[in-house]
Image (cartoon, rainbow, N blue to C red):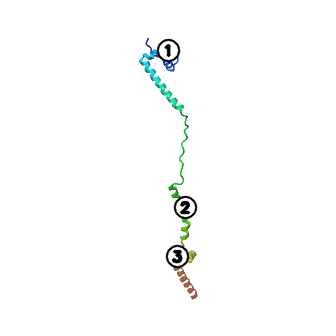
């Protein structure tokens, strides 16, 4: 009978467990003689060796807890911010100095203002607009002429 080792037999052989005496001897003999089973045992031994090395590497050093990344800190006194703050401070200081050296402009004397107000009052006090004065003057002059004529006729009677 030419059968290969089962998964349980491979596991028992690699773990060094004892089967029944006859079965253990047969499994060891077959693994030594069969090329395929010998390759499978070598592959499993290699995997177990890698696993042991990895397990020893993990347990040899204590576990390291990673610290959370430190948040970047902001620097408040950078060159652009200092320049902007200096310019703002200079502008605030210069406002009173400028106002002291440059008083607000005056737009004329009080006498000129009084004359202008009198002219406005005179224009508002008129009962008729200035553009109609010649017409009114003409009408008054014709009335005066007409009333003089009536007066002169009344005296003649």
Q: Position of residue 16 (x, y in %)?
A: 51, 19
Q: Position of residue 156 (x, y in %)?
A: 57, 88
Mark 3 lies on a secondary structure that is helix
Q: Are marks 1 and 3 in contact (CB under 8 Å)?
A: no
Mark 2 or 1: the one toward you: 1
- Total numbered circles: 3
The N terminus lies in quadrant: top left
Q: Is residue 41 above or below residue 99?
A: above
Q: Are marks 2 and 3 in contact (CB under 8 Å)?
A: no
The residue shown at (47%, 13%) is 26
Q: Residues within 10 Å of mark 1 (few under 14, many from 20)?
A: some
How far apart, in angstroms, are the residues tagged by discs 2 and 1?
95 Å
Q: Which residue is mark 1?
A: 24
How far apart, in angstroms, are the residues tagged by discs 2 and 3?
59 Å
Q: Is residue 100 above or below residue 76?
A: below
Q: Nearer the viewer, residue 123 or 40?
A: 40
The residue shown at (43%, 19%) is 38
The residue shown at (45%, 15%) is 30
Q: Position of residue 114 (x, y in %)?
A: 57, 77
How far apart, in angstroms, are the residues tagged by discs 1 and 3?
141 Å
Q: Residues within 10 Å of mark 3 (few under 14, many from 20)?
A: few
Mark 1 or 3: the one toward you: 1
The residue shown at (58%, 88%) is 155
Mark 2 lies on a secondary structure that is helix
Q: Residues within 10 Å of mark 2 (few under 14, many from 20)?
A: few
Name which of mark 1 and mark 3 comes first in the sequence: 1
The C terminus lies in quadrant: bottom right
Instruction: Tell me, for residue 89, which label it has, or none.
Output: 2
Q: Which residue is mark 3?
A: 130
Name which of mark 2 and mark 3 comes first in the sequence: 2
Mark 1 lies on a secondary structure that is helix
Residue 123: quadrant of the picture? bottom right
């Amino acid at each position: 009978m030419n059968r290969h080792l089962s998964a349980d037999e491979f596991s028992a052989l690699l773990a060094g467990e004892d089967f029944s005496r006859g079965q253990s001897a047969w499994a060891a003999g077959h693994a030594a003689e069969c090329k395929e089973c010998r390759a499978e045992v070598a592959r499993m031994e290699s995997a177990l060796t890698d696993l042991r090395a990895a397990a020893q590497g993990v347990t040899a050093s204590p576990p390291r807890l990673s610290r959370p990344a430190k948040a970047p800190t902001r620097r408040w006194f950078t060159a652009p911010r200092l320049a902007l703050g200096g310019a703002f401070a200079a502008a605030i200081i210069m406002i009173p100095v400028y106002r002291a050296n440059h008083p607000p402009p005056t737009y004329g004397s009080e006498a000129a203002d009084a004359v202008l107000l009198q002219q406005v009052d005179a224009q508002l006090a008129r009962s008729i607009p200035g553009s109609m004065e010649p017409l009114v003057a003409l009408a008054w002059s014709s009335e005066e002429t007409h009333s003089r004529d009536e007066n002169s006729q009344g005296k003649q009677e």
